[in-house]
Image (cartoon, rainbow, N blue to C red):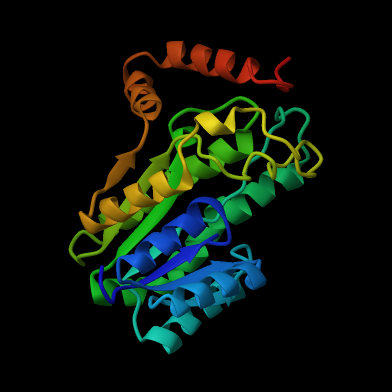
Amino acid sequence: MRDKVVIVTGSSSGIGLATAIKFAKKGAKVMLAARSYDIIKVVADDLNTSGYTAAACKTDVTNENDCRNLIEETINKFGRIDVLINNAGISMRALFKDVDISVMKKLFDVNFWGAVYCTKFALPHLVSSHGSVAGLSSVAGFIGLPGRAGYSASKYALHGFLETLRIENLKNGLHVLIICAGFTRSDIRKKALTADGTPQGFTPREEEKMMTPEQVANAVYWAIKWRRNYRILTLEGKMTALVKRIAPRFLEYAAYLKMKNEPDSPLN
C-alpha cells in the first residue's frame, strides 16, 4: 500500500478514523472525508507531523456535489486514486409502522447514495489504477433486522450495487470488496435515528464486549491488500450468512428474539 492513494469517507470517528490511520501508517496517502472538517483536519495534520501523508476534505456524502468535489480534491492533491473506502453510515431504531418516512430516506441518502455518488465520480480513476472499491456493511445486509428496516434495506441495496459493479468490471481489473463488520464500539448506536428522526442518544448494547474500530480497520486493510471479494468478520456474521441459506425461517425467529431482548427494544 505504500504511496497508494486512499479515500476514506466517514473518517472523523469510529471505523473510518481507525481505517484512515491504519492505511496512513502503512505508507498510503490518505484523504479523510467527513462533515466534521475540524476533526479530520486535526487528524490529517497530526499524521503529517508524524511523517505520514494525509489530507482532509469536508464532505457530506448525501450531497452529490460534495462527493464530486472530494474526488476532484483528491486528484488535485495526489494525482491519482487507488482505493475508495465507502465507510460513512448511520443506523436507526424504530419499528417501520412508527417511523417517519424521512428517516428511511436519510438512511438511504447516507448508506447507499453516499457510496453510489463517491464511486461514480471515482470510478474512471480506479479503473485506470486497477484499484479497489470497498463498502462497509454488516450482518444487516444478510438478514432484515427488526427495528432497523431502513438500515437493513440500505445495506441490501449496497450489496447489490457493489456486486453489480464487480461483475461489470471483471475485465477492467477493478477490485470490489464488501466487508461485513460485527457490532463495533462506536457512536453509531448513540447517533441512531429514532422514529421521528432524532438521535437515540444511548447504546442498548455492552460496548466493551464489541470489536474495536482498530480490529475492523486491520481487517479492511488486509482484505483490500489481498483483494478479497467478501469479508465477514465475526463468527455470528458467518453463521448468519450460512443459516440464511439453509434455515431462513429459523434465522428470522432468532433475529426477532435477539432484537426483542435489547434494553428498551421497540419490539416490546
Residue at the image position 76 percent from the left and 44 percent from the top: 199
In this rendering, does residue 161 appear at all? no
Place of residue 40 in the rendered image (x, y in percent of width and height, measured from the top left): 58, 69
Quadrant holding the N terminus: bottom left
* Total numbered labels placed on residues in the image: 0
In this rendering, does residue 148 appear at all? yes
Place of residue 181 in the rendered image (x, y in percent of width and height, measured from the top left): 43, 40
Between 1 and 251, the one nearer to me in the picture? 1
User: Is 265 left, or right, of 219 in this rendering?
Assistant: right
Between 168 and 214, the one nearer to me in the picture? 214
Vertical position of residue 67 compared to residue 102: above or below: below
Place of residue 6 in the rendered image (x, y in percent of width and height, measured from the top left): 38, 69
Residue at the image position 37 percent from the left and 13 percent from the top: 247
User: Is 187 left, or right, of 209 in this rendering?
Assistant: right
Vertical position of residue 199 compared to residue 54: above or below: above
Quadrant holding the C terminus: top right
Place of residue 168 in the rendered image (x, y in percent of width and height, measured from the top left): 28, 59
Residue at the image position 44 percent from the left and 63 percent from the top: 20
User: Is 100 left, or right, of 181 in this rendering?
Assistant: right
Residue at the image position 38 percent from the left and 84 percent from the top: 78
User: Is 10 left, or right, of 48 in this rendering?
Assistant: right
